[in-house]
Image (cartoon, coloured by chain):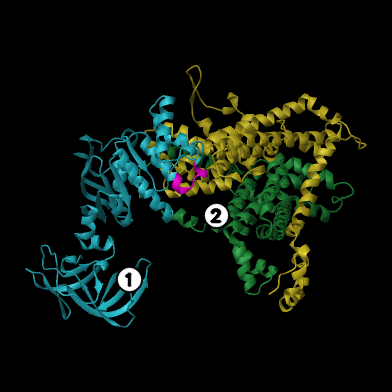
Amino acid sequence: MTHLELSHIRKAFGAAVVVEDFNLAVNQGEFISFLGPSGCGKTTTLRMIAGFELPTAGTITIDGNDLTNTPPNKRNVGMVFQSYALFPNMTVAHNVGYGLKITSKSKAEIMQRVHEMLALIQMEEFAQRYPFQLSGGQQQRVALARALAIRPQLLLLDEPLSALDAKIRLELRHEIRRIQRQLGITTIYVTHDQEEALSLSDRIVVMSKGKIEQVGTPTEIYNAPATEFVARFVGHINLLPVTVLNPTDGVISLGRQTLRAGRFGKLNGRPVQLAVRPEEINLGAKPDTNTLSGEVESVTYLGSIVRIGLRIEHHPLSLDVFNEHTLKLPRIGETHTIHFPVNACWLIEKSD
Amino acid sequence: MGRFSSIRVLLCFAVPPRCKGTVVAMSTSPPPRYRNNAWREHPLWNWVGLVPFFLFIFLFLIIPSLNLFTGAFVTNKGFFTLENLSVFRNPLVLKAYMTSLQVSLLTAVIGGLFGFFVAAAITLGHPPRWMRSLIMTFSGLAANFGGVPLAFAFIATLGRTGFVTALLKEVCFPGPDGTQICPFNPYDHGFSLYSLTGLVLAYTYFQFPLMVLTITPALEGMRKEWREAAANLGASTWQYWRDIALPVLTPSILGASILLFGNAFGAYATAQALTGGSIPLVTIFVGQQIRGDVLGNPHEGYAMAMGMVVVMAITIVAYSMLQRQASRWMKV
Amino acid sequence: MKAQQINWWAIFWIVLAALYFLLPMYGTLDFSLRMERNTISLKAYEIVFADPRFWRGFQYSTLMALITIVVSIILFVPTVYWMYLKVPQARPIMEIITILPFVIPTIVYVFGLIRTFSRPPFQLTLHAFTTDMLIVAGYVVISMPFMFRAIDVGMRALDVRTLTEAAQSLGSNWFQVLVYVIVPNLRVAILSGALISFATVMGELILASFLVRPALAPYMALLGLTKAYEPAALAIISYALTWFSLGLLQIVSQGGTTRQLTGR
């Protein structure tokens, strides 16, 4: 059932159009991520949902109620900021309880709710601390509790983990997902980190230059990126310029070598590229797969995997192999044969 | 490269020519000679470089200040006495203290409020950038523009023949009984620049810019996200100011107020030049006491001066107590 | 990025502030030009500039200001440097000491200073030269809050320890580090402190007046007692002086301000 609906949203600051024709229907309890590079309009869209920015055109509805022109303090939408934005003059308990105090709830009720929220984020013993006495991760958890305390219809998170250390980021990521599942609250999560988006979301909205590039589940986004932008932005990918020899069964050529693509949509006659993820490629030859050969240019040790860079028909290509103890690494300058399954690669039109 | 002896560094500052030879000697001679000097590792050794500064401060700040205190408690012959404190029973002296406090509080409050609104206007009001730079530049100027010239400027503007006074004489104002008063001469209606009102007007000229200068950084530190987070939780603008903005600003406002108070309390030149000493301020009294003894007992002057320090000390103690309360939530 | 909408409430306060700044300034300028009846003239300025006492005061105050600045730099730069390098724990006490001249009313300080140094064992007020020494010491103390703070702020922006170690590793001794590395990096800070000190000393009335030295401010005060138009001219001249030193300060310390002022 549709909970939040954005239709034909457009936002312009003067002559600069920041968001254009943004359409999205979010279901009750869904976890949606807005993913894209900085300046793609994802934060602006989130701020329009929160009410901090007014859309130039379009409507925002929650449960069928038009909220487009409702001021932010009347929307009952919880928001978590990148910079935590805890009120420095209030203790943790007062921060969490502030939204309830505004709605003139009784002291006992506020106290009970604050306890409940602090239990949810497992920080009961920090109730009397001030924000400056907390670490970044703790502050962000309090900010989450504060946003949730008012029982919002919607939870908005604006790059909540960007300011934190890598380890805390991972911890908190799981915590956000756990709490979101537990409360079943509809959530919009803005991030530029594809790993966060992939691991957290029910669906991902990939944006670029103010427009939606693709909406889909993490699997769809990763395995079947619709555009070159999505393919490049999410994960690591090899894109090799190829020539289509036979559009019906997908026979293509890369220089002097002939290959088959597993999937190819409607081709409009524009230059196409063969897309294949590094982890799908293996060393050596195998029958009934695409087989290519090229010179090894680099071998990069990344811990659990080793990334090998080759040059095939003048084009760079990288492949990942698991770092097993039996692994015999190729040397730079050697010529190696590689293979990947036909259905692990697909064609993408080159974007302008 | 050798670790340079601290003493020699000091000598360098005092007698530069001596350095040259030392420097050359130092850079060529091997350093290990110093290695065994354990006394050099003593923590007190670290303070040696501050000796010239402390010597200067001791001579020209500490001794004169101590002199005031001892002077306030001795007789002409140099014996200890509390007699000099009787100066505070003198109604003229008490009046002077009251007037000084009154002027200082008044200009601190008026200048503080005015300055706060101006600072808020140039930070939160998002005016065109040139307006903001202009106000900041003028504030820097006006806060430093006190003393005699300020008095002259106000005399030329609001004095009996001043520019604004002349302008006011051209216009009509509705009188209290509904009739028009033409021409309106403010001096016929109780106003005088050479009075307390005039003094407050003149002091405000440097007080409010000082407030602008001191409070603007604090206002700039107000994060946009606080306002948004508050709005997000349902707070109105007024609730945001009451619950977050003002509490967050309180320590800065307190600090600025004490600055303004002290600034007015110690001001002398403007009052002297504006009123020729006819308004009894403590500073004017102390000034007269330096010129020549007007109270009959020179040590009563010490007592009066010391009284001012005591007032400032009490203000600062009160301030720091309030400050501790207001800034519990701040990192030290 | 935000759409520019004019906030009338803000404009109101800004205009009010601008009026408070400009009206007395304009009033004074207007007044100073009206010495001759029914005509605008520079008569008041001519009289002031023809008065040798004005030049004497100007010269004396400028000289004292320059000496004060030099003494302040020689005294404070090495002190602050040493504090950063060796005794950072001295900072709180240094801060309290350097703010004292701001807390103690100048007239009280001068009272103490004069009573201390006008009698044995430290009598300095007998000769003009020693009195000037005393005056410089007083000016250094009075301008200390500005000077110290400026140098302190400048030094804080530098990584003094790393700079020192880098220079030492290249063969400098401490004196060379100070003169060739620290001071050049502090140029802006020192200059801004110096300009505020300059403005302070040029306008300082109390010390010179009670020690009866021919400084600018006592001359002005004296003139104010007997004349009407000349003081206005003098006020404009000191406006210009303050403008000059603090305007210079703005340019030095912010670099871009002048461009912003004229850029839009």
User: Circle 2 sits in a helix, a strand or a loop, which is it?
Assistant: helix
- Which residue in the protein does label 1 denote? A307
Q: Quadrant of residue A151?
A: top left
The magenta stretch is A131-138
Quadrant the N terminus of chain B occupies: bottom right
Q: Amino acid at mark 1?
A: Arg
Q: Residues within 10 Å of mark 1 (few under 14, many from 20)?
A: some
Q: Is residue A76 left or right of residue C206?
A: left
Magenta stretch prevailing secondary structure: helix
Q: Which chain is green?
A: C
Nearest the camera: B199 or A84? A84
Residue in view at x 73 percent, y 29 percent: B96
Q: Is residue A344 left or right of residue C184?
A: left
Residue in view at x 28 percent, y 61 percent: A233
Find residue B83 and report its horizontal and vertical position in percent. 86, 29
Q: Which chain is cyan?
A: A
In three-dimensional space, the C-alpha distance between marks 2 and 1, rounded to whole angstroms, equals: 55 Å
> In this view of the protein, can residue A9 be seen by the observer?
yes
Find residue A2 and report its horizontal and vertical position in percent. 19, 40
